[in-house]
Amino acid sequence: MARIARVVPEVSLDRAFDYEIPKALTAQVTLGAKVRVPFRSRELVGYVVDFPNEPFEGKLKPITEVLGSGSFLPASLIELAQWIAQYYCAPLTVALMSVLPKAVRKADAAFKQRLWVEPLTAVLNEEVAVVLKKAKAQRAAWDYIQQNGPGWLAELSQASGLSAATWKGLAERNLVSIASRTQDRDPFLHSPVVESVAHEMNAEQITALAMVREEIAAEKPRVVLLHGVTGSGKTEVYLQAIDHILSLGKSALVLVPEIALTPQTVERFRARFIGRKVGVAVLHSHLSSGERHDQWQHIRSGHARIVIGARSAVFAPLENLGIIVVDEEHEHSYKQEEAPHYHARDVAVMRGHLARVAVVLGSATPSLESYHHAKEGKYRLAEVLARVEEGQMPTTHILDIRTAAKKGSPPVLVAPRLIEAIQLRLDRQEQSIIFLNRRGYSSSLQCPQCGHVEMCPNCSVALTFHRQAAKLRCHLCDHSASVPHACPQCGFAPYKYTGSGTEKVEQALVEAFPKARIARMDSDNMKGKDAYAKTLGEFAEGRIDLLVGTQMIAKGLHFPRVTCVGIINADLALQIPDFRASERVFQLLMQVSGRSGRGQLPGEVFVQTRVPFHPAIQFARHHDYTGFAEQELEFRQSLHYPPYERFILVTARGRNEEKTIFVIEQLAREMERLKLPDTEITGPSPAPIARIEDRYRFQIFLRTRRITAVTPRLRPLFMDRAWPDDIRITLDVDPVDLL
């Protein structure tokens, strides 16, 4: 009986295929191995996911070749991918491709090989010295490498001004060796750190750490929800828990929600563990393909025992995992927008469950789902409610910007009281952060005579005016257009700019404080690979007085000299038709205000709003998470919203409106015929944003008590199904965005 390997090929199908293992490849075909297999009339790359024991009487095609060496997919990640495929109703291949980064899968993925030059002797004998006297370029090369040491051939040639042929001439005289060597594409290459030591913890931190260590030692660890106010030292708890894990010979995985947080987090972890010679790897989308490949391979080989990264780092191929930390666990950026629509926090919890590894979820404003699990006893709750070093929570001032409008004044962009507070910080040489979660200059361009608004031709949204680029731009499809001089509807000029973005706030602050050093951080100007780290580094060094930005500056960052935080239009997100709107506003206010007063200096927060008495704003003003959570959970329970019931969102997109409606109505009828248990189906109906990228959007909404009872019956409707070419159907389990 031939030995059989079950292989998932890189083709979008929801199944694995059996292949014979040739005797010559027996030793190389291991679980998780990367192989080439015949598939219909071609050959594909695939991954071994199982070795079935049942006999096969027919003839199987043999595996053609084993690519690379060792396992690309540990057994734990294969099991995790299979769970993702089932829970999120995704094809198995798609789930596996999420686990394995493209930088590793592509055919030419390899370490970078370059030529390394190294001297073979430190002393010239007389005979060679005479010869080199006549070969002046080679003598100059010899003197250069003696003074500066070995290096890469290309860099030595550039720095010395001597050709590669000159260096090769030295090699021919056996004075230097030139050999091919692997060059590590290291994202930390230009980021030296100073070693730090563990801080003394307060009583709450000690209790939280003890709880985490109990779960590390447990046979079946429970998730620990670490609820700690901003500045309470949650990171120190993480660091000391990981120090304990390392002492046990195990590894650690740390997830952060934003790329902007990664440089500062990585720096703190490297500083703590650099003295122990522990490798720290980083995984996020701003790495080059080569850097991502090398970091992943270092993790796979065991050279890196601590991994820090954004959403996809949850799949880091760490062996002997001891702890998973999900920082800012409430963040919606942990949710994957493309299939499979996984939530990295929930995947981390499942990875911990499957591997029997402790999982710590940390946040100053835990998601209501996680907080509910903790209150129900499913998770353990550790609370750290005092700031470290006796630091006080900032004083919060609510600025009602309606009052100026009542007096006939123009709308207030930056309130006078906030201007005064910023000036006070400039006088004291302290720093300020101004937050507005809307980029661009003006949110729309409207004719004051006929009311015409410049709309995106591809989406059901207004175009945003970007003054610096002198363009109108859609933030959904990235369509751009020139700014018209007159209204195309009635010919009236000039237009009226309505609404405000970070560009407009930045300009107002430049005009108010011409001598201040002001920087802006949003996705429009943070384009380069190192743009985040560079700007945050300058702010940390005190070379920026005033930082303006969107939510990428709102959380996780630690700058002790920031004593003033201003929040512009705090109630913007309350207008979004989503039951999570209040929770998001509360979380943002708490997270942004937490950037203030993190050192010895007291902090203040100024919240500009038109709805000063909204519960989300009032609870945030008093830093009262528990009060907000209890009121919001009561509201959710009365309306059967998560976490009390669960949602599934099915969306159809198509360029032809009637055809899209026809397809989703047919799908809705098929769902109704399934008679899904304890499930209410609503729709189809137009999505809140009815058109994006010139595609009409319609939704079916499922509300259920038991996701795991519903998804197995839904999967057959979506797997390996051929939809019309111009129609796209997506299924999102536990959606965080209902628009």
Image: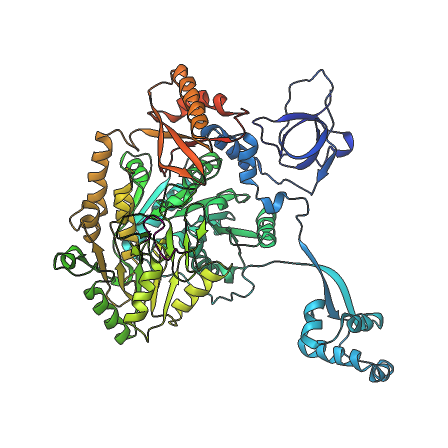
Looking at the image, residue 470 sits to the left or right of residue 615; the answer is right
Q: On the picture, is 75 further left or further right than 492?
A: right
Whether 489 is among the magenta residues is: yes
Q: Residue at x 47, y 61 (%)?
A: 531
Question: Residue, x 56% and y 63% (percent of image)?
Answer: 189
Residue 717 shown in magenta: no
Looking at the image, which residue sits at the far front? Answer: 491
Provide residue 230's location: percent of width, then percent of height. Answer: 30, 55
Residue 660, located in which quarter of the rendered image? Answer: top left
**Which quarter of the rendered picture does the N terminus lie within?**
top right
User: Could you say which is closer to the camera, residue 623 or residue 582?
Assistant: 582
Quarter that holds the C terminus: top left
Where does the image place residue 688, in percent across and percent down from the top left? 34, 36
Region rendered in magenta: 483-491
Residue in front for this viewpoint, 132 or 507: 507
> Residue 708: percent from the left, percent from the top?
41, 25
Look at the picture and state if 246 lies above or below 166: above
Residue depicted at x 61% and y 53%: 290
Q: What secondary structure prevails in the magenta region?
A: loop
Specify whether 499 is left or right of 354: left
Q: Quadrant of residue 161?
A: bottom right
